[in-house]
Each structure stands twice: as structure tokens, then as C-alpha cells.
Amino acid sequence: MDVTRARAWQTLTTYTKAESLLRHALAVEASTRFYARLFGEDEEFWGCAALLHDFDYELHPTLDKHPQDGAPLLREEGYPEELIETVLSHAEHLELPRDTLLKKTLFACDELSGFIHACGLVRPTGLEGLEPKSVRKKLKQPSFAAGVHRDEVYAGAELLGLELDEHIANVVAALRPLAAELGLPTGN
Ligand SMILES: [Fe+2]
Ligand SMILES: [Fe+2]
């Protein structure tokens, strides 16, 4: 099959109806696409893997099933193993090797996209003017966006060989054009 954005979106929306999950998928897609452009990689393929990484979460909301029980569904639809392996590798509990740049990038973008999304939601101007310094400060407040695993945010930047501030700035830049779709104030 041809892995296209339209196909991936169709798969995602077949299994996922919750707006919050769709927004998470869009945010991780935008961040992963940003890095695909930066690294000169296949933006469409990277974006599809990111869009689908939590596609089965509504169906399998627990870690004894997500994302491992989603893999056969993707296989049935004809997605290539490279994409399926990438989707599986985002899950810490599966302890799979992150042995491609795409796997590293997806892991690095997953939690941080959610966190920056949360930062934007509590600011009147959304992501406009959001500096890495204030994101870092919020990372140190355990009660803020408590569901985001801080250790995975730090590990992700390290995996990409980036300073945390640079990684934060990249993800903010990636999400900014999506502000309206993510339900963020657009500052105007
Ligand atoms: Fe997940
Ligand atoms: Fe995710």
C-alpha cells in the first residue's frame, strides 16, 4: 500500500473519536514532520507514523493492550512493518530498540508535544512568545500537566542529541501553525 496522509487519517479516525486524542495525534504529527524537514527525511511517512502512534488508544486504553494489540490492525490494513515497528517503539513498557531516527524522533516528540500543548492552553496568547525557559520551569512543577512523564521528555531530547531548549523551541515552532486546530488561543 501507499502510505499517505489521507489513508493514515482515515485509519486514525476509524478508531479514534475523542477530540483530545485527535489533537494529540495532530500535535505529534506536526512535531515529527518538523524534524523530518530538518533532517531531510520522508516527511509524509514520518508524519503518518506519528499520526498513527496512538491510533488504538481509545480501543485499548491500558498498557496491557496499547499499542501492541493495535499492531495487527495496522498489519491487516496493509501498513508496512517499518511503520508498525515505529508505532510499537514509542511505548516504554515494550522496551523495543529505538534504532532509527524516526523512532527516536517519535519518542522525543510524543510527551513534549502534549506538554507544550498544555502550556499553550493556560496562556492568553497560546504558543506566541512561549519561551523554552518558561516551559522548563513548568516541567519542574509536578502538578502541571501531571500526566506527562518528565523523564521521557528529557530522555527524548538526549536521544536526538539536542539541548532541551532547542528541542522545546522546535516543538513550539512546529505546533504554532496548528494553534486553531489544537484549540489554543491564537493571540489575535
Ligand atoms: Fe501511546
Ligand atoms: Fe502519544
Image (spheres, grey):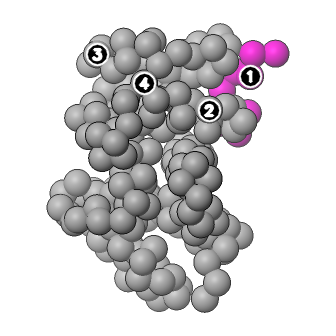
Q: Upstream in the sequence, badge 4 or badge 2?
A: 4
Is residue 186 shown left or right of residue 81? right
The alpha-carbon separation of the residues under discs 4 and 3 comes to 14 Å
Q: Which residues fall within the magenta stretch?
A: 180-188
**Snapshot quadrant of residue 75:** bottom left
Question: From the image, which quarter does the N terminus lie in?
Answer: bottom right
Residue 140: numbered disc: 3
- Write down the residue under mark 2: 173
Q: Nearer the viewer, mark 1 or mark 2?
A: 2
Q: Upstream in the sequence, badge 1 or badge 3?
A: 3
Whether ligand 2 has any atom under 8 Å from the Cβ at mark 1 is answered as no
Disc 3 is placed on an element classified as loop
Residue 149 coordinates in the image, percent (x, y): 28, 35
Cβ–Cβ under 8 Å for marks 1 and 2: no
Residue 106 on the magenta segment: no
- Write down the residue under mark 1: 186
